[in-house]
Structure formats: structure tokens, C-alpha cells
């Protein structure tokens, strides 16, 4: 497992703590299917923690064990320091399931009223929060619309609204941008950042690596039911010992530079490449001498896509990311059992 | 604790009231109730009793259709569509969800029984010139039995599918109303011992349609049976 040193020490107990989570489906006689073998993660307070992994890695099952939606076969689950299974532990938690559906014969207002009441809010509080919340997720004026008339994207937005109702201090979002158009995805990203600014802790499970890279402070990468990597996103993505340089100039790179660089890419007069840290000074000086204009000098950083692909390729699982392992997934009734 | 149960129950009521199956059965049953007085005459003094007999049977049949349709589909549909996740993810215990669902269906059935009672009372009054208020006693018996059927269906469908739940509910009703003959060896008029579970206590057609109604103590017995079953 790849593990980076935490860049900042955790000063207090985490908002979410999962230790050695394990989930088996089926009976021993019929062949057990292990959905989650050993997953541990901690979401720091006020942080956005990304949970990544290919299909069938165990992300959703881990979340469902945390939320009491499936019974864990083993492990420890805590929310704000209290055992997650304890009554009242999830009172301060908002949850957006993957592809949320709601009773289709309810209106958006009735659905929010239901979820608000289940969170212990008074009707007055719900009424005060519902309208601005619907507006915030892009559903202004839809309070009285039946959910059977909602599109997939609108249901996703309503799912976000119900997860944020009551201003929970811990929010679990399973694929929040699923089914949303690019504008909606941007809105969700901004919403998560706003929530973090108000002190909420977010556990975000997503396939959208760009989304995770844009908002997450920490990530845990799962593969085949175990943790493949975890740490601060900068620590995971920064490539040790190498620096990225972008410079603008005419013609070829100076000869003194060309022999020292890797990963060259050109866009018009702009050249981008990486160099070993110890050669940065020589390269910059040579570019300067060759009348090149230095645009940026930054630590070399993988894209999350590159990192993720490399990690899976190293473990020989890249092919698994192409297709969901539907046959391995438990049925809904197995999950709720 | 009960606030969550009530919230789920009210959501079930809102959802059920917008379901077409509920209104289709109600309208169909109301049309049949209107047609009862046009049945062949059974002679002076007997017509009103026959009307009450048919009205109770019709109310019972229509109520069973509604309660089974609502209660066997509710939990499997919520699990299949995963709408249950947003509820159980909110610190709601499974028993609260199941009891809330049951309570919601019972509340819907209260409305259904009141609607049937209003229709049959009105038709009886218009046709025979006197209101058959004893039909309210039959409505109460049907409501209590529907509550038991709903609880049974929810219990079954928490683990099994809707079709299995519907078949099991019909089998449960059959056995529940046949216990006396089964225990009594098929002898007509045989009564099962009080401790044998039976639904016969809710069979009030004879005293309500052809007799003078049921006593307060009998209502108490029905309520006790309802409590024990649920």
C-alpha cells in the first residue's frame, strides 16, 4: 500500500473513523463473496476526504456499513467519536446515496419535510431551510412539483438538498455529480467547498477524478476491498525529486537544456517539461541565457488520473476498471439485510 | 422516537393517496355499492339486511385489495429503488421504518373505511329510508383485520418479494378464517379454543347485517385480538 505522511497532524478525533472494515456476502456453503476485506480510513474534521477506486473496489459497501445500511462482518465505525451504530450517532450526518431515488408520489417539499423530520427538525425549521436549500441546489420554484416529474439530474440535486438539510457537520456523498451536467457538477464542487468553509467534514466517494482532485484534501484509494493508497492529495500526486518547468521562446530548447529534460510538450511557443530537482538552477539559467521567458517552476505533479492508472497497473488490475463487476454486486435486499 | 415513526407514516399516506390503484378500487367499489339495491328483491323487510350483507362483503373485498396492494409493494419497492437508504441513513432504526410504514397504511385504511361507510350509509339511507349505522361496526372489524393483514404483509415483504407477500397474505387470511373448522374437525358451527389464533373474531356479517349488531364487549374482544396479532 502506498501511504504518504500526513502533512498536518490531526489535532482531535476524526469526524469519521473506519478501522478494519470487512463485509462478506453469502453463506459459507454457497461460497462467500468478500466485498470489503480490510478498509481503514479517517476523515479529519473540516476536511474533504475522497474515496476512490474502480468498480467493485468496495467504496459504496464501506459507506453503507458506516451508515448502518448493511451489517458489517467486522470492523469499527465511528462518527464524531461515537460508534456509528449507536442511536443518535447519525443525527449530525447527511447522506447522499449513489443514484438517489425518492418516493415518486411525493413533492419536493414533502420529501424534504420527511427527511427533516427524520433528522429531528421541527416543521418550522424545515420550512425556513427548505426554500433556500432548494434554490442553492438549483431547484428554485420546484417545491410543489411531484418527484415523478423530476429528471435524473433534478433528483440528484434534491438528494444533495436532503443531505444538507439541517446543516449536518458530517456529510457522506456517494457520487454527488452523477447525472449532472457540467454546470451542475461545478455547482456541486462549489457547494462542497462552501460546506468545508463552514466547518463541515465531507467523505466523498467519486469516479470523477477531476472532481476529487479539485476539492479533496485527503484521499483513500481502494482496490479489491483493501486500501491501495492514502494520504494528502499533494503528497500522493507530487513526484518526488522532479520539477515542472514551463517556458516561452522561439525555436528549439537550448542544447544545454534539452539533454536534462523529460516529458516535453509544446503548445505553440510554450514548452512544458520536467527536470530533476538538482538541475533546476542550471536549466533556468540556460533558458534565461537563450532568451526564453520562464512562465512557471513548480513541483512536478501527476494528474490523479495518471496516478490512479499507475497504481492499478502496478497491482495488475487496470483491466478491472473498464467494466463494472455487476455480477459481484449484492442485490438491494442483500444490502439492506 | 415516535416522531420518526409518525413522519414515515405521513409520507406513506401522502404517497398512497396519489396512487391510482387506491382510487380505482374505491371508485369501482362505490359503483358496485350503488348497484346493490338493484339486485333481485328478497321480500319485504329482508331487502335492507341483504343490502347490509352485500355492503359489508363488498367493503371487505375492496379493502383487502387496497391493503394488500399497498402493503406488499411498499417495502420491496423502497428496497429495490433504494429509497429506503435515504431514510435508514438518517438514524432511523429498522423497526421505526417498518412500524411507520404499517401505521401509514393503517391510516390510509381508516380513510378508505370511512369513505366506504359514507357511501354505503348514504345509499342505504336513500334506498330504504333509514341509515344503517351498524355498518360502522363492520367497518371497524374490517379496519382491524386490514391492520393485521398489513402487518403480516410488511413482515413477509421485509425479507421476500411482493408476489410472495400477496400469496402469503391470501393464505394467511384463508387459514385465519378456517382455524375453527380445522380445529373442530370440519363440524359446522365448531369454535376454536380462545387461545388458538384466528381471524374469525372479525367476521361480523351475521350480527351486523341480520342481527342487532355487536356488543361493546365484542368490540373489546376484537381490539384485544388486533393487539395480540399485531
Image (spheres, coloured by chain):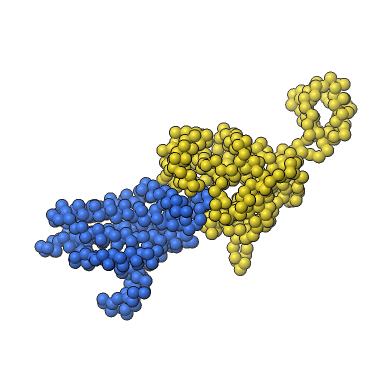
Residue under the point 47% across and 56% down: B96
Residue at the extreme top: A291
Residue at the extreme left: B44
Work out whether residue B129 can be spotted: yes
Residue A295: where, in percent of width, then height? 77, 25
Residue B183: where, in percent of width, then height? 34, 77
Residue B158: where, in percent of width, then height? 47, 60
Q: On screen, A316 above or below A306? A: below
Q: Which chain is yellow?
A: A
Q: On screen, B215 above or below B18? A: below
Please give left or right for residue B22 compared with residue A273 in the image.
left
Q: Which chain is blue?
A: B
Q: On screen, B209 above or below A329? A: below
Residue under the point 36% across and 56% down: B106
Q: Quadrant of residue B99?
A: bottom left
Residue nearest the viewer, comparing A127 with B75: A127
Quarter of the rendering occupied by the C terminus of chain B:
bottom left
Residue under the point 57% across and 51% down: A89
Please give left or right for residue B144 compared with residue A293 in the image.
left
Q: How many marks?
A: 0
Q: Quadrant of residue B176?
A: bottom left
Q: Quadrant of residue B225?
A: bottom left
Residue under the point 63% across and 54% down: A77
Work out whether residue A56 can be spotted: no
Please give left or right for residue A194 compared with residue A260 in the image.
left
Amino acid at each position: 500500500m502506498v501511504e504518504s505522511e500526513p502533512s498536518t497532524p490531526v489535532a482531535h478525533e476524526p469526524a469519521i473513523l473506519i478501522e478494519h472494515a470487512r463485509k462478506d456476502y453469502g453463506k459459507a456453503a454457497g461460497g462467500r463473496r468478500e466485498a470489503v476485506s480490510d478498509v481503514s480510513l479517517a476523515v479529519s474534521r473540516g476536511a474533504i476526504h475522497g474515496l476512490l477506486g474502480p468498480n467493485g473496489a468496495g467504496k459504496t459497501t464501506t459507506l453503507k456499513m458506516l451508515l448502518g445500511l448493511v451489517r458489517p462482518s467486522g470492523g469499527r465505525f465511528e462518527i464524531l467519536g461515537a460508534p456509528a451504530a449507536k442511536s443518535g450517532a447519525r443525527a449530525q450526518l447527511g447522506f447522499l446515496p449513489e443514484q438517489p431515488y425518492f418516493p415518486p408520489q411525493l413533492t419536493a417539499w414533502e420529501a424534504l419535510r420527511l427527511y427533516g423530520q427524520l433528522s429531528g427538525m421541527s416543521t418550522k425549521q424545515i420550512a425556513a431551510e427548505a426554500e433556500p436549500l432548494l434554490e442553492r441546489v438549483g431547484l428554485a420554484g420546484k417545491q410543489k412539483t411531484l418527484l415523478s416529474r423530476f429528471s435524473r439530474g433534478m433528483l440528484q440535486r434534491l438528494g444533495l438538498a436532503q443531505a444538507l438539510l439541517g446543516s449536518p457537520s458530517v456529510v457522506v456523498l456517494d457520487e454527488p455529480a452523477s447525472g449532472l451536467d457540467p454546470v451542475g457538477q461545478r455547482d456541486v464542487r462549489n457547494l462542497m467547498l462552501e460546506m468545508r468553509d463552514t466547518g463541515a467534514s465531507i467523505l466523498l466517494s467519486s469516479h470523477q477524478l477531476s472532481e476529487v482532485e479539485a476539492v479533496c484534501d485527503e484521499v483513500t484509494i481502494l482496490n479489491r476491498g483493501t486500501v491501495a493508497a492514502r494520504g494528502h492529495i499533494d503528497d500522493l500526486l507530487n513526484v518526488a525529486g522532479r520539477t515542472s518547468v514551463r517556458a516561452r521562446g522561439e525555436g528549439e530548447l537550448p542544447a544545454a537544456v534539452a539533454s536534462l529534460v523529460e516529458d516535453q510538450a509544446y503548445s505553440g511557443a510554450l514548452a512544458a517539461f520536467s527536470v530533476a530537482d538538482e538541475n533546476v538552477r542550471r536549466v533556468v539559467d540556460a533558458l534565461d541565457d537563450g532568451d526564453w521567458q520562464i512562465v512557471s517552476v513548480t513541483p512536478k505533479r501527476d494528474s490523479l488520473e495518471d496516478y490512479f492508472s499507475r497504481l492499478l497497473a502496478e497491482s495488475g488490475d487496470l483491466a478491472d476498471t473498464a467494466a463494472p463487476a455487476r455480477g459481484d454486486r449484492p442485490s438491494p435486499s442483500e444490502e439492506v439485510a | 422516537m415516535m416522531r420518526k415513526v409518525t413522519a414515515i407514516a405521513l409520507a406513506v399516506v401522502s404517497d398512497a393517496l396519489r396512487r391510482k390503484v387506491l382510487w380505482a378500487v374505491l371508485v369501482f367499489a362505490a359503483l358496485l355499492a350503488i348497484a346493490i339495491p338493484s339486485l333481485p328483491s328478497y321480500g319485504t323487510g329482508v331487502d335492507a339486511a341483504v343490502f347490509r350483507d352485500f355492503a359489508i362483503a363488498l367493503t371487505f373485498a375492496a379493502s383487502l385489495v387496497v391493503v394488500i396492494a399497498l402493503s406488499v409493494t411498499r417495502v420491496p419497492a423502497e428496497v429495490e429503488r433504494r429509497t429506503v437508504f435515504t431514510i435508514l441513513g438518517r438514524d432511523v432504526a429498522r423497526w421505526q421504518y417498518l412500524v411507520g410504514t404499517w401505521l401509514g397504511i393503517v391510516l390510509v385504511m381508516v380513510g378508505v373505511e370511512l369513505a366506504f361507510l359514507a357511501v354505503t350509509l348514504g345509499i342505504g339511507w336513500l334506498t330504504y329510508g333509514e341509515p344503517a349505522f351498524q355498518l360502522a361496526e363492520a367497518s371497524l372489524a374490517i379496519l382491524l383485520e386490514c391492520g393485521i393483514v398489513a402487518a403480516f404483509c410488511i413482515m413477509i415483504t421485509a425479507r421476500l418479494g411482493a408476489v410472495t407477500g400477496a400469496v402469503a397474505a391470501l393464505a394467511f387470511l384463508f387459514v385465519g378464517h378456517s382455524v375453527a373448522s380445522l380445529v373442530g374437525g370440519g363440524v359446522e358451527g365448531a369454535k376454536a379454543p380462545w387461545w388458538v389464533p384466528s381471524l374469525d373474531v372479525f367476521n361480523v356479517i351475521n350480527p351486523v347485517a341480520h342481527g342487532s349488531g355487536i356488543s361493546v364487549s365484542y368490540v373489546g374482544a376484537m381490539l384485544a385480538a388486533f393487539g395480540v396479532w399485531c
